[in-house]
Image (cartoon, rainbow, N blue to C red):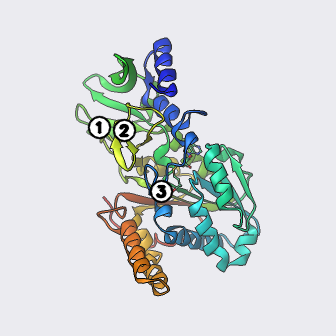
Amino acid sequence: MSTLAQFLARRIALQGPISIATYMAEALGHPQHGYYMRQDPFGRDGDFITAPEISQMFGELIGLWCVEMWRLMDQPTRFQLVELGPGRGSLMADALRAARVRPEFHSAASAHLIESSPALRALQQQRLQHAGVGITWHDDLVQVPAGPMILIANEFFDALPIHQFERRPEGWRERMVSFADDKFTLALNRHVTPQAVLIPEALTRAAPAGAIAEICPAGIAIAAAIADRIAEFGGAALIIDYGHCRHSTANTLQAMRNHAVHEFLADPGGADITAHVDFAALADAARAAGIHGPISQGDFLRRLGIEFRAMQLSQRATVAQARDIDSACKRLIDPSEMGTLFKVLAISHPDMAVPPGFEQPVETA
Ligand code: SAH
């Protein structure tokens, strides 16, 4: 058994079963043995691959989106460019390179990266050393200095710990992680637990017996903090992740290792654990500011011109490279790949014009 598994088993023996949120927080974020603390999990050789690692086009288009938002903010001479969970730093690097089209944007920006993993902070520093803007790292959004802000978060919210509840005849009961016969197992808490108050009314009304409610208090708190900041100082945020537009009663907890699904209780710290993002809950928490979307990633990237950018890159490429560019573009926007599962939500100051990509309402599942 791994050191982290032993630590969790001992904790359960002493204190009783722990919530899935506690298990997830330790499995991902334990200072020594947490999944993100130990290694670089991204890319073809890692456990999963994210959009900015698939293609530079993703970060470039988001960089241009940021420039346009800065223009709509009346071009403040100083603002914070914030990223939550920057991974390898590729998105920020590509975004800042594309944003060089407006030198004034570059000179106004100071970058603030929210990253809990020292290993990933080191990778980000290396990747961004020639990015041309000052960079500061923080543990938490509250540490970012006050002022106008443009924030981006790709595949950050899915890594935040969730609580899971099961609908029983007597009400919602929380699923807990317990330890027996040398393995972690799930058990329902017989008592009502405090996070149950966060379960949306609409779910309670419609949920059949056995339905699952997933609640992410950390995500709700961060979305509210982003909206409060934007309402007070101006700015915009772009949240991209896999998830659903309406509250769902599905069990979406999943673990990934070597690009394959892995049992999430099998090896805490050894695999990535995520849950689909409840965009309705984030939008609800961010009501202090203006909300746009969620729309599908496919619609968003297509409207920002990804197909045109792919064509442009292909013209300067070899035949093999052009094939790669084309398949990366498809992977990002095709409904059978990332195009529909991934959603994009924008939060902006209520006085601002509609952000690029969100102009027309679109129907998403
Ligand atoms: N945005 C990147 C990486 C996504 S993985 C990409 O698209 O490739 C999630 C990232 O969030 C990692 O960098 C991880 O270390 C970081 N992270 C996860 N939970 C965090 C938390 N609570 N606080 C700060 N960073 C966190």
Residue type at numbered disc 1: Arg
Task: Name the residue: 54% across, 49% down.
Answer: 40
Q: Residue at x 46, y 37 (%)?
A: 270
User: Residue type at mark 3?
Assistant: Gly
Mark number displayed over residue 201: 2
Total count of labels: 3
Which label sits in the foreground, 3 or 2?
3
Q: CA distance from mark 3 to mark 2?
A: 39 Å
Q: Is residue 324 left or right of residue 121?
A: left
Which corner quadrant holds the C terminus?
bottom left
| Residue 279 x/y as whole percent | 43, 51
Residue 272: where, in percent of width, then height? Answer: 45, 42
Quadrant (top left, top right, bottom left, bottom right) of the N terminus: top left
Q: Which residue is mark 1?
A: 205
Relative to 216, say whether 169 is above or below: above
Mark before the other along the chain sequence, 3 or 2: 3
**Which of the labelled discs sits on residue 248, or is there none?**
none
In which quadrant of the rendered view does residue 215 lie? Answer: top left
Q: Is residue 106 above or below residue 245?
A: below
Amino acid at circle 2:
Glu
Residue 64 in the image: above or below residue 5:
below
Callout 2–callout 1 Cβ contact below 8 Å: yes
Residue lying at 75% horizontally and 68% vertically, measured from the top left: 108
The image's mark for residue 43 is: 3
Element type at marker 3? loop
Q: CA distance from mark 2 to mark 1?
A: 6 Å
- Left or right? Give the position of 364 relative to 19: left
For residue 354, say whether it is visible. Answer: no
Residue 200's quadrant in the figure? top left
